[in-house]
Image (cartoon, rainbow, N blue to C red):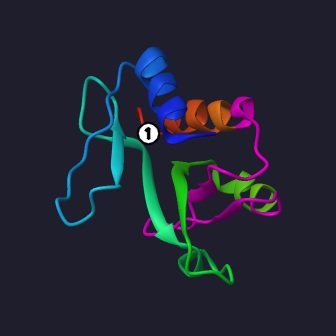
Amino acid sequence: MKRESLFSYVREHYNSEPEYLWSNLPDYAVFRHHNGDKWFGIVMSVPGTKLGLKTEDEVDILDVKVRPERIGSLRQKDGIFPAYHMNKEHWISVILSVSLSPKEIHELLADSHELTSR
């Protein structure tokens, strides 16, 4: 899934625009609940080595919150890693260009949106 496709989906389904909060990290975009400050996702471009990959090439990732009991099984899938720069007990990083289908990414976003609305 490409960034722009993800951004369009989030706009349409969650009424949330990507927010670029850090001038020194222009590729980092946060998704917030439209009626509050809580994040339900963040898109970042990071070197693969930050995820334990054997490449310095930048990869686009999406961090989402998941139920702790799902973390182990999700991390077994290609393209899913312990969260970069977030609580690893509650968040995961998903490489956007890997084998997850748009439907799987949409489901993870839906769960994250629900979990962060409390």
Rendered residue at 45%/15% (across/down): 12
Q: Amino acid at mark 1?
A: Thr
Residue 81 percent across, percent down from the top left? 66, 66
Residue 97 vs residue 103, the one in the foreground: 97
Q: Is residue 113 left or right of residue 73?
A: left
Quadrant placement of the N terminus: top right
Tally of numbered discs: 1
Q: Quadrant of residue 40?
A: top left
* Residue annotated with mark 1: 116
Residue 5 percent across, percent down from the top left? 54, 30
* SS class, disc 1: loop
Residue 10 percent across, percent down from the top left? 46, 26
Whether 46 is among the magenta residues is: no
The residue at the far front in this view is 57
Magenta residues, dominant SS class = loop
* Residues drawn in magenta: 75-104
Q: Is residue 50 above or below residue 86?
A: below
Residue 24 percent across, percent down from the top left? 20, 66
> Crowdedness of circle 1 by 10 Å Cα count: few (<14), some, many (20+)?
some
Q: Is residue 105 left or right of residue 18?
A: right
Residue 50 vs residue 118, the one in the foreground: 50
Whether 102 is among the magenta residues is: yes
Quadrant placement of the C terminus: top left
Rendered residue at 70%/58% (across/down): 71
Q: Quadrant of residue 37?
A: top left
Rendered residue at 51%/23% (across/down): 9
Q: Is residue 47 above or below residue 11?
A: below
Q: Is residue 79 above or below residue 8?
A: below
The residue at the far top in this view is 12
Rendered residue at 36%/18% (across/down): 15
Residue 82 vs residue 48, the one in the foreground: 48
